[in-house]
Image: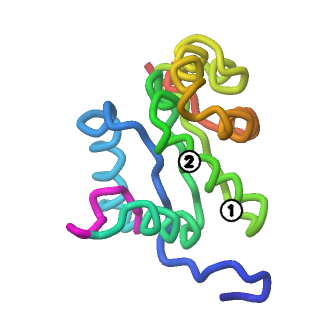
């Protein structure tokens, strides 16, 4: 650990995403990372039999750049919302760089939890009631970072 108690960097980039982009955008991104020799953590680096959540937390904490690929279905996954909460915690605590990518979704939908994000929060209302306030705060904060909108590249 360094002076600010930040865990030592192991990965250049941690990629948080919802599974539906795995065979499209994510595969192109991981190919580009390999070409540029960027050490990126994507969940396919998890070992079989490994306890998933502690491994993801460690990877997030030990990554210099935290890339969040917001897609229309991202907020439907409690796992993704837990990841973004940990990502924002690391940004606030250790000064990690957060880069949001808005893939086929408007940043305002993420920031204000409207559209498909509003629908996802309605689904989470009973099962994840206590986490919702935190999740809303971290989505609002993460959508406020300068990022990349896929609609600008189509």
Which of the pair 36/125 is nearer the observer?
A: 125
Q: Residue at x 62, y 54 (%)?
A: 87
Which residue matches tag 2?
82
SS at mark 1 in the image: helix
Secondary structure beneath label 2: helix
124 relative position to 39: left or right: right
Q: Looking at the picture, does residue 42 appear above or below residue 146?
A: below
Which region of the structure is painted magenta? 39-49
Comes first in the chain, label 2 or label 1:
2
Residue drawn at (71%, 88%) of the image: 2
**x%, y% of residue 11?**
47, 71
Mark 1 lies on residue = 90
Q: Is residue 43 magenta?
A: yes
Residue 23: quadrant of the picture: top left
In space, the residues marked 2 and 1 are separated at their CA atoms by 13 Å
- Residue 32, given in percent of the width and then of the height, sits at 34, 52
How many tags in the picture?
2
Q: Is residue 47 magenta?
A: yes
Please tell me whether residue 116 is drawn above or below residue 27 in the rendered image.
above
Q: Is residue 150 left or right of residue 43?
A: right
Name, please, the residue furthest toward the top: 115
Question: Which picture quadrant has residue 60?
Answer: bottom right
Compare residues 31 and 129 and report the one nearer the observer: 129
Residue 24's disc is none
């Amino acid at each position: 650990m360094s002076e600010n108690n930040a865990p030592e960097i192991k990965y250049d980039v941690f990629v948080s995403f919802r599974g539906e982009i795995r065979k499209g955008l994510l595969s192109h991104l991981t190919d580009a990372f390999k070409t540029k020799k960027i050490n990126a953590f994507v969940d396919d680096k998890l070992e079989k039999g490994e306890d998933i959540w502690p491994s993801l937390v460690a990877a997030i904490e030990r990554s210099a750049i935290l890339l969040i690929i917001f897609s229309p279905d991202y907020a439907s996954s409690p796992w993704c919302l837990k990841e973004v909460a940990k990502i924002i915690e690391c940004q606030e605590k250790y000064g990690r760089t957060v880069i949001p990518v808005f893939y086929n979704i408007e940043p305002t939908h993420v920031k204000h939890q409207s559209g498909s994000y509003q629908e996802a929060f309605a689904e989470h209302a009973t099962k994840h009631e206590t986490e919702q306030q935190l999740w809303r705060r971290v989505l609002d904060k993460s959508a406020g970072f300068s990022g990349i909108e896929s609609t600008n590249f189509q």
